[in-house]
Image (cartoon, rainbow, N blue to C red):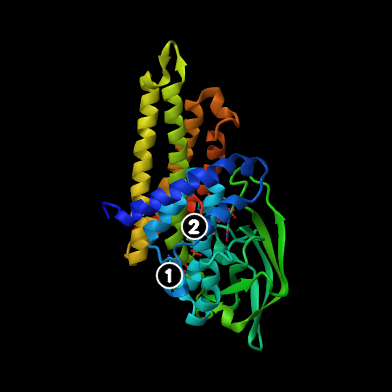
Amino acid sequence: MFALTEDHRDIRAAIREIAEKEIAPHAAEVDEQERYPSEAQKALTAAGFQAVHIPEEFDGAGADAISTIIVIEEIARVCASSSLIPAVNKLGSMPILLSGSEELKRQVLPSIAAGDAMISYALSEREAGSDAAAMRTRAVADGDDWVLNGTKCWITNAGVSTWYTVMAVTDPDAARPAQGISAFVVHSGDPGFVVGSKERKLGIKGSPTREIHFENCRVPGDRMIGAPGTGFATAMATLDHTRPTIGAQAVGIAQGALDIAVDYLRERRQFGRSLAEFQGLQFMVADAAMQIEAARTLVYQAAAAAERGDANTTFLAAAAKCLASDTAMKVTVDAVQLLGGAGFTRDFPVERMMRDAKITQIYEGTNQIQRLVMARSLLR
Ligand code: CAA
Ligand code: FAD
């Protein structure tokens, strides 16, 4: 993959226009008021960009992984919170796409493709974050149904989503904990499904993060994804496809910050000269652009590898997420520096981008866990 197709370039142009005209104008207010980016959701749904990855056979656009990455990247360039609309729709639906029955796909995916529903992904618990297999949420068979009890935490778009992919322990006596975990699709209307209070966060303040509780939550048997005991492997295989989407979010945030810094250096004058003439600052923007290009290339490479099912996908997905998020953090900190005092104020978006960048080093596995995953694939 050394060149994007004409389709990819067209998608970038279309989503950039929507991002700049309909999402960017609300980004500061969404952050300030910590409110859901409903304008973004509306604009993305109207244009069919809220879940482009859903295959045509389930009424979706059938976009490839690179197209999905481009959509997320371009939205994140102006508003990281809004980019979690397509990103989490992919994350939540991927377990079903990878391992769900045909009937389950038909039950869930068309509503997401149409924009009538969103889907979240519920793996983490308060005591089982990096060590995801240590989860406690239980699912017990009762007739044809499963009854879930427990609490998932940090669930992005909880309360907004209609569907939830939930990993729960079905066999606590399994030889290894991961082999006793199964995956389910829960509907917000299922009895015993309760949404908790909203987290107060450093960044991505427009993206709601909540606990979800299962209080004898009854789910029909046909909503199990795949066979019992395969839920953890499905959850991990999902992350191979979606860690690159978090990489794309990070690349978008970094690009957005660099674009603002470059404009500022051209306009601002000190010591009778344009800031753009100071070599110390020129080297900072050159490094930022170089690091963004490297991260972007790896993110696209990882997304394409996951879609093809290449053997080194797990390594590439972890590496892409790790490199891109570390790049976003470095570039956004430098962007604040390049704008001086102005960068430290809310009059410019770079301070928001710096706060938003931080989460990309933490979620979908911290960067320590990405390094663990990379090392395991190298040394096993
Ligand atoms: N594909 C398929 N199967 C996989 C796999 C993969 N990439 N990785 C692991 N598995 C399977 C293994 O084959 C193994 O199966 P067997 O037991 O049958 O051999 C099973 O899963 C357990 O694997 P491990 O022994 O490697 O499991 P572990 O307990 O050592 O944990 C881990 C591995 C990499 C640390 C994992 O727990 C992990 O990724 N932790 C981070 C959690 C995480 O990323 N959470 C993201 C939450 S979503 C989010 O944050 C949302 C958001 O961004 C908006
Ligand atoms: P911990 O696991 O407690 O880690 C604490 C520190 O220890 C970290 O620095 C970590 O890297 C380090 N550490 C842990 N284990 C090791 C090790 N073996 N080696 C070296 N270092 C280690 N989860 C979902 O399931 N769905 C979501 O939609 C979702 N959205 C999120 C949104 C936000 C805003 C946030 C903050 C989190 C979200 N998460 C979600 C959860 C996220 O994936 C976890 O926070 C993340 O995996 C880390 O888990 P933890 O917070 O429990 O940290």
State the quadrant of the N terminus: bottom left
The residue under the point 60% across, 77% down is 170
Q: Visible in this render: residue 321?
A: no
Relative to residue 279, is residue 179 depicted above or below? below
Outermost residue toward the left in this view = 2
The residue under the point 54% across, 56% down is 85
Q: Position of residue 150 (x, y in %)?
A: 68, 68
Left or right placement of residue 224 versus residue 210 in this view? left
Rounded to the nearest angstrom, the CA distance separating label 2 from label 1 is 17 Å
Q: Position of residue 304 (x, y in %)?
A: 34, 60
Task: Identify the element where label 2 is drawn.
Answer: helix
Comparing 327 with 66, the one in front is: 66
The residue under the point 62% across, 42% down is 31
Residue 380, picture quadrant: bottom left
Question: Which residue is under mark 1?
Answer: 55
Relative to residue 262, is residue 149 depicted above or below? below
The residue under the point 43% across, 29% down is 263
Q: Residues within 10 Å of mark 1 (few under 14, many from 20)?
A: some
**Label annotation for residue 47:** 2
Q: Visible in this render: residue 222?
A: yes
Comparing 218 with 23, the one in front is: 23
Left or right placement of residue 173 versus residue 237 in this view? right
Q: Residues within 10 Å of mark 2 (few under 14, many from 20)?
A: few
| Rendering quadrant holding ligand 2 | bottom right
Comparing 327 with 296, the one in front is: 296
